[in-house]
Amino acid sequence: MVRYLAVLGALLQAGPIVADTLAGRVSGISDGATITVVDTARARHTVRLAAIDAPEARQPFGRESKQHLSDLVFGKEVKVEWRQRDRYGRIVGKVMVQNTPCPTCPPALDAGLAQLEAGLAWWYREYRREQSLADQGYYEYAEFDAKARRIGLWQDEAPLPPWEWRRRNQIVARLVTAPEPFSPQRTSMRSASRDHS
């Protein structure tokens, strides 16, 4: 009995197992994988579409990816199914939007899947375990199909995934801002030139 209560206590402290749901209207699009949702209490929430990553603004197809997501969700009511926040505090979830002009129909279009189908995002395989098996299958096939048809970013011979693009830019930024290494020879040359002036 004591062991049962200890396990039950640990489960309760771990938090809910089921996903939370956020409902609201999309008021902003940051990029091809990030939106702002305003809920009924007028609170703003930054939402990252789960299991996809889109090209950065300065990457090829970055603007097209953002525009496509905007066409899908901007100004529309969405339902976000989520379980966690990322390290920036953004909700990470599956964004469902109404795809028809029917005001009483539930949101039925998966915006992340639509981005993959248009060839304007990558399936983020690293996070596939956070998806249902059905969603993993849909997302994998959507990316495969877009790649096979060479649409969107797959028109390029070797499109660079945004996580690699960000890593390369961070390395370049570090190299550009790195302090000049100490050199006793340079110091003595500077002091010698000061002595002669």
Image (cartoon, helix red, strand yellow):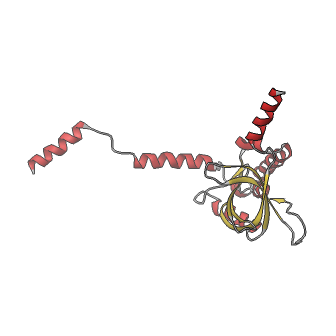
x then y, percent, for residue 93: 75, 53
Nearest the eye: 100 or 61: 100
Q: Work out whether residue 119 can be spotted.
A: yes
Residue positioned 61% across, 52% down in the render:
88
Name the residue at the left extreme: 196
Q: Is residue 160 left or right of residue 24?
A: left
Residue positioned 73% across, 51% down in the render:
50
Residue positioned 43% across, 45% down in the render:
175
Residue positioned 79% across, 49% down in the render:
19
Q: Quadrant of residue 22?
A: bottom right
Nearest the eye: 96 or 1: 1
Nearest the eye: 185 or 2: 2
Which quarter of the rendering shows the N terminus? top right
x then y, percent, for residue 3: 80, 27
Q: Work out whether residue 32 can be spotted.
A: no
x then y, percent, for residue 174: 45, 46
x then y, percent, for residue 67: 69, 66
Nearest the eye: 125 or 86: 86
Q: Where 87 falls versus 110 (above or below)?
A: above
Q: Is residue 197 left or right of residue 125?
A: left
Name the residue at the front extreme: 2
